[in-house]
């Protein structure tokens, strides 16, 4: 039996999922495979990788609730092949429960809706990695070697590749290579801004931290300690990690007062101030409590207007046919063709949450003619603003009429009576203001209009919703710019409004992704319907300029709307701002300059007029993968050899767009410089971003998750029929 040499470069979470599939497939074949498997990871953190290392600070949160993390294929994955026994494929929730039962450590005492710390995820990943490695090593004919090494090149050797490492050890000869290199950074000298900042720090005592992770190594020393001011460029998840590490991670504590407000108690090791800033001046919005987790099949949203079928109709009618033969389908413009459907769907969800199922049915019917007209005449609208306005107008008008009736009832000007549709709308509205139980209590006064009005006014809204239905109005502009530039005159007023929004946003997130109108709309369209967006974008689905806008603008909107931190993390951020350790007053459009006179970085807010000087600048932005600029030698070397090439979206009467990722087939095999497909190599994760969209993320249970299906692209290369078998359980 010929032996097959397999090399996996990158030992992080996706590698753990890969090993689970290899273990199940190998055990199912009862010894008729001879595999030599070598796994490389430069950090040596096999199973977790450095990003999810159990050794990292305990202040960083995973961006996924416990109930939505798995480590193995399950019955939901179509054509997964054989499945391991249930006890060999625990979810993160199962693992936490087992650890809590064994140790009694409250860190593991989590329920499905809790947000775990990232180090816990790392512990679980390493446990499962070890479990699957043991299964493979126990299988006849299988050898496994783990190497802590930095892979720098793949050199063709007959029908295979020599895997070259920086340590100079004898290269392993692999028949098939799987690249799972994960998130990376680009060489600082290739970024004009970082290069300028680096030259400045060489002349002065200021410190530049070009990449935040691992924070235990990067965020140390006097430039980030007591007496210093640290500027944090980026207010997304990485930026939040930085804020928490420099405060709570140094020994500070958060306590909750009698009024329920979280307060920060400093330890004396923090910087004097952390200036948080970004292009838009906003943190990602608080991630809502996931009410869908109790029944994903029932509650995960299915689109009415934003659908694959609608995108295809638009593509057939208005898609631009590109002369390049590799672009096999007509290209759309995201803003002109797809975005208006997303806004219409958000409006429908927002008002349906606010007024109930009868409203939803009426709104769908009312929007139907404008929707069909858009699908037939999309290119005739002046711009996407006009298209959004016309598409949503029927829903907005219907909502305004219902709001007037609801307000008439709740202010005592109208008796609720027997109107079933109105009763449902009033009930739904009061439920949004409060909860089902409190809504029922208030409606007990329904036959006494004055008493109902008094009760509603007295009850307020714990979620800080306006009591008047007319004040609830869906607006895309307000959704993405909750602190508008024309809404404040001074930095102090901006600070107050910023904190006011954060307080409301946390309350809305706590209400949940089914109960809060805004959170429901964002979660449904930008998470549940993300597959429609992916279908619209992947493999040159958008025109070059539109693709650039989508990645530069709308990916940021997506991240803020539905990829934010937990309420717990955002409460801590608010506490740090109130305590004066985090300063957000530079506001939107902030820019960094090098102050030669002081030798410090100057952070300037052109909108608020605030200027701050910083001893250290942390670049906490997540960098887009760029094979030519990658800090690792691997991808630049593969480019030089012609084994891979970057994907370019060619423009017609506009510049080409090269996002930085690799040119890959739908099976994740790279296209070589000469245009041929290299089927011996498979690339998953961030390097596929560009030709594809949103190819990263933790494995989810009960989801037919794309990560497992992507992994099968690799296993099918050397086990051609592995995934076509009927799923069955195998014994470890």
Image: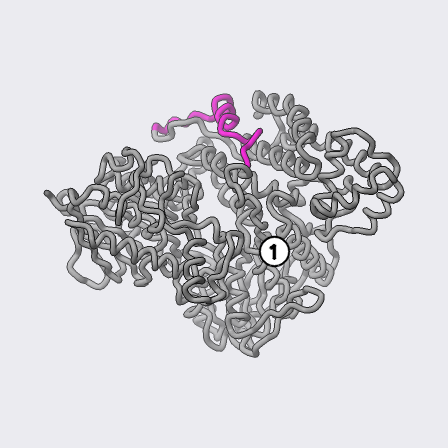
Residue extent of the magenta highlight: 301-325
Residue 654 seen:
no
Estimate how packed mark 1 is, as few (under 14), some (14 to 19) or many (20 or more) residues with alpha carbons within 10 Å. Answer: many
Its colouring scheme is one colour
- Answer whether residue 334 is magenta in the image: no
Residue 76 percent coordinates (x, y): 40, 38
Q: Which residue is drawn at 57% across and 23% down?
A: 375
Q: Quadrant of residue 248?
A: bottom right
Residue hosting label 1:
281
Residue lying furthest front: 101
Taking the spot 66% from the left edge, 27% from the top edge, the residue there is 361
User: At which x and y percent is residue 461?
Assistant: 75, 51
Secondary structure at numbered mark 1? loop
Residue 551: percent from left, percent from top = 49, 43
Q: Nearer the viewer, residue 99 or 256?
A: 99
On screen, residue 537 above or below 157: above
What is the quadrant of the N terminus in the image? top left
Residue 666 appears in the figure: yes
């Amino acid at each position: 039996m010929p032996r097959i040499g397999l090399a996996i470069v990158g030992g992080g979470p996706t590698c753990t999922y890969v090993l689970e599939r290899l273990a199940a497939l190998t055990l199912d074949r009862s010894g008729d495979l001879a595999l030599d498997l070598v796994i490389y990871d430069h950090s040596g953190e096999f199973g977790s990788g450095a990003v999810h290392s159990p050794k990292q600070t305990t202040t960083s949160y995973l961006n996924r609730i416990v109930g939505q993390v798995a480590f193995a294929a399950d019955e939901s994955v179509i054509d997964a092949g054989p499945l391991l026994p249930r006890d060999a494929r625990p979810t993160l929730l199962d693992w936490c429960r087992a650890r809590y039962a064994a140790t009694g450590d409250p860190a593991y005492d989590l329920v499905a809706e809790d947000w775990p710390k990232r180090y816990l995820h790392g512990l679980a990943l390493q446990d499962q990695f070890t479990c699957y490695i043991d299964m493979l090593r126990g299988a006849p004919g299988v050898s496994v070697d783990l190497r802590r090494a930095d892979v720098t090149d793949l050199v063709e050797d007959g029908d295979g590749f020599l895997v070259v490492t920086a340590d100079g050890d004898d290269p392993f000869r692999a028949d098939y290579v799987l690249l799972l290199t994960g998130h990376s950074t680009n060489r600082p000298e290739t970024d004009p801004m970082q290069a300028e900042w680096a030259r400045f720090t060489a002349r002065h005592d200021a410190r530049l931290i070009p990449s935040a992770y691992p924070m235990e190594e990067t965020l140390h020393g006097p430039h980030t300690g007591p007496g210093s001011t640290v500027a944090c460029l980026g207010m997304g998840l990485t930026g939040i990690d930085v804020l928490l590490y420099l405060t709570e991670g140094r020994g500070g504590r958060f306590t909750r007062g009698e009024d329920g407000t979280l307060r920060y108690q400093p330890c004396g090791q923090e910087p004097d101030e952390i200036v948080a800033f970004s292009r838009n001046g906003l943190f990602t919005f608080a991630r809502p409590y996931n009410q869908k987790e109790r029944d994903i099949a029932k509650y995960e949203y299915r689109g009415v207007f934003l659908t694959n079928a609608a995108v295809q109709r638009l593509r057939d009618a208005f898609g631009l046919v590109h002369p390049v033969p590799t672009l096999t389908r007509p290209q759309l413009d995201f803003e002109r063709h797809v975005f208006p459907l997303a806004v219409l769907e958000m409006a429908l969800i927002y008002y349906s949450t606010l007024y109930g199922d009868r409203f939803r049915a009426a709104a769908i019917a009312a929007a139907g003619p404008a929707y069909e007209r858009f699908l037939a005449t999309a290119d005739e609208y002046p711009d996407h603003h006009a298209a959004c306005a016309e598409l949503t107008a029927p829903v907005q008008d219907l909502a305004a009429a219902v709001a007037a009736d609801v307000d008439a009832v709740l202010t005592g000007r109208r008796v609720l009576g027997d109107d079933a549709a109105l009763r449902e709308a009033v009930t739904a509205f009061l439920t949004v203001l409060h909860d089902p139980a409190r809504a029922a209590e208030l409606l007990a006064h329904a036959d006494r209009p004055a008493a109902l009005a008094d009760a509603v006014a007295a009850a307020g809204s714990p979620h800080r919703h306006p009591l008047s239905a007319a004040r609830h109005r869906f607006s895309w502009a307000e959704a993405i710019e909750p602190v508008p530039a024309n809404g404040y005159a001074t930095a102090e007023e901006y600070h107050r409004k910023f904190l006011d929004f954060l307080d409301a946003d946390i309350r809305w997130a706590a209400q949940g992704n089914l109960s809060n109108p805004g959170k429901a709309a964002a979660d449904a369209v930008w998470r549940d319907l993300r597959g429609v967006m992916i279908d619209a974008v992947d493999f040159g689905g958008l025109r070059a300029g539109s693709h650039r806008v989508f990645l530069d603008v709308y990916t940021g909107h997506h991240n803020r709307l539905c990829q934010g931190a937990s309420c717990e993390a955002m409460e801590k951020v608010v506490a740090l701002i109130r305590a004066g350790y985090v300063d957000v007053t530079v506001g939107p459009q902030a820019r960094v300059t090098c102050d030669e006179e002081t030798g410090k970085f100057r952070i300037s807010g052109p909108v608020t007029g605030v200027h701050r000087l910083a001893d250290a600048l942390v670049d906490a932005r997540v960098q887009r993968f760029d094979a030519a600029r990658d800090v690792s030698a691997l991808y630049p070397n593969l480019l030089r050899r012609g084994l891979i090439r970057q994907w370019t979206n060619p423009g017609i009467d506009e510049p080409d767009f090269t996002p930085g990722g690799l040119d890959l087939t739908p099976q994740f095999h790279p296209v070589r410089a000469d245009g041929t497909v290299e089927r011996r190599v498979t690339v998953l994760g961030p390097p596929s971003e560009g030709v594809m969209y949103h190819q990263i993320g933790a494995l989810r249970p009960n989801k037919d998750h794309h990560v497992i299906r992507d992994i099968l692209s690799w296993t099918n290369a050397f086990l051609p029929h592995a995934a076509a078998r009927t799923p069955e359980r195998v014994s470890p």
